[in-house]
Image: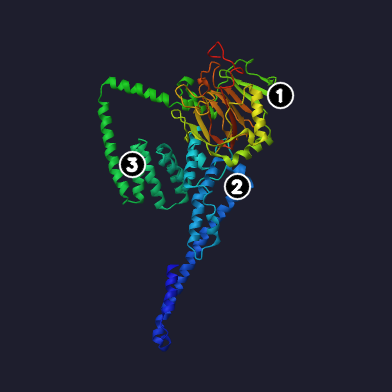
Amino acid sequence: MKWMSLLLCMVAVATADKFTALVELENSIYIENNMVNQLNSYIQAEEKKMEHLKELASKLTRVSQEAVEDPDRYLHHPVNSFLLIKRFHYDWQEVENFIRLDEPRTDYIANISSYKDIIPSAEDVEGAAVALLRLQDTYKLTTSAISNGSIQGTWDTEPLSAAECFEIGRAAYNKDDHYHSVLWMQEAYKKMLKEESTDTKKIVVLDYLAYSTYMQGNKNAAMMVTEELLKLDDQHERAKSNKEYFEHEIAKEKKEKEEKKEGDNEDKEEETVEDEDNDLMNIAPGDRPWSALNERDRYEALCRGDESVVKVKGKPWQLRCFYKHNNAPRLLLSPIKTEVVFKNPTLLYYHDIMDDREIKVIKSLALPKLNRATIQNPKTGVLEYAEYRISKSAWLKSHEHAVVQSVNNRIQDITGLTMETAEELQVVNYGIGGQYEPHFDFARKEEVNAFKELGTGNRIATLLFYMSDVEAGGATVFTEVGARMMPIKKSAAFWYNLYKSGEGDLLTRHAGCPVLAGTKWVSNKWIHEYGQEFLRPCSLYPDE
């Protein structure tokens, strides 16, 4: 555009006496020829730009139509959710940048400006990428399976490009998660070779990969990556410096190993024992005994449903199904279908205790109130965000709608406990890889400030409504005992957090597993101690 303006100015200021001598017009022929060449170059550049814009529009049209045809199914796949967020921050930003170069500016710019506050941001892109990493770890997904859109337990979707794999790797890098950074930078580089990407892009990926590989402790591999980078750019200053450093470190490590070999037999025996311990830790969680697993391993194995880890505890006559009414008038003609799925702690399913209409009303009431879910700081009692709880929640009071009041009445009838001192109904929706890592619902003795403001004592029991089925993942697991409860729409899970003595039951430590595919809607009622003195009286036995 600048050169075009210059041409117009040049034409405008030219003196008007060239017609008086043909010799002077001769120069104008060459000037015009140059102007024609410039005009054609401008047209070619614009056509090239438009071709690129058309390709981008074609891609965006295709994926948008696929999403609009069935929004729920589209968003229920984690890769699709990530791609949608990514498109807003990168693809649509590229479209906007193209259009802003044109004068006069079109209505498009004015229209999209109104969406700026509601479309996903750069933080959302990184959050979605980290969510994919969380799913990768929990469900043992390979990098290639995620990048190719073929995740077991879900349906196939659009594969990720090299640039999109790079964004996931960079999100891991920014979190100092060099393990995942290496996996995703390697995947990005493989795809770049197939896509015939420019050397400039490859250099960026190799630069990240070299550093993350080194941070993983693999100096030889870091050296190989650096050498590959230098083949593409032998003047890359950081790569040249890194190569010298890696050579020094590798030589130093080699010398230390040689000196170690000359050590006595006692040192060798200690190394052997240490290696055996390391081998034990490298055994897959499903192949190790329950007692050898740490909580993280138990949590992830239970989320996957590993048969060697999931336990069913209780005698056949204890694990049974029956109808329950507690002599509550509202339940006499319509008793509740009750299933005991685990003993010690006793875990119950209440089936078909919420209908589709009630679920729809509760969701509609909660939607405008949804905010990032918080946890209570055990020391201060203050509510705050935490990386281990990824969801959005809202709180509904009984007086807001007759359905909320009806649900609260039903909880009181089913449990036989008063709702007068219970917390409001909490409605929760889990997003991409949404989870709530292992935790207790009750406050332990050292958490003296927990629930202090409520003035209703500790959380005596939890009732958790499942308001949606989940295609894959999303189980509620109890990490101390190996119990696993899957979301069943219209049903609820129930357990006591406290013994009758008021002591906390440590076996109720539980977690909400990441949602692999689908969406997870739950609502829960935390029931407190005060007011239950005669409804659930103390016992002479402390562990009852």
Secondary structure beneath label 2: helix
Asked if disc 3 and disc 2 are in contact, CB closer than 8 Å, the reply is no
Task: Estimate how packed mark 2 is, as few (under 14), some (14 to 19) or many (20 or more) residues with alpha carbons within 10 Å.
Answer: some
Between marks 2 and 1, how big is the CA–CA gap? 43 Å
Instruction: Identify the residue at image location x=39%, y=86%.
Output: 23
Identified by mark 1, the residue type is Leu
Q: Position of residue 288 (x, y in %)?
A: 47, 22
Q: In this view, does 19 lie to the left or right of 422?
A: left
Seen in the picture, residue 109 relative to 278 is either above or below; the reply is below
Camera-side residue of 251 and 309: 309
Tell me the residue that label 2 is attached to: 67
Instruction: Identify the residue at image location x=63%, y=30%.
Output: 488
The mark that comes first in sequence, 1 or 3, is: 3
Identified by mark 2, the residue type is Ala
Tell me the residue that label 1 is attached to: 331
> Can residue 504 be seen by looking at this rendering?
yes
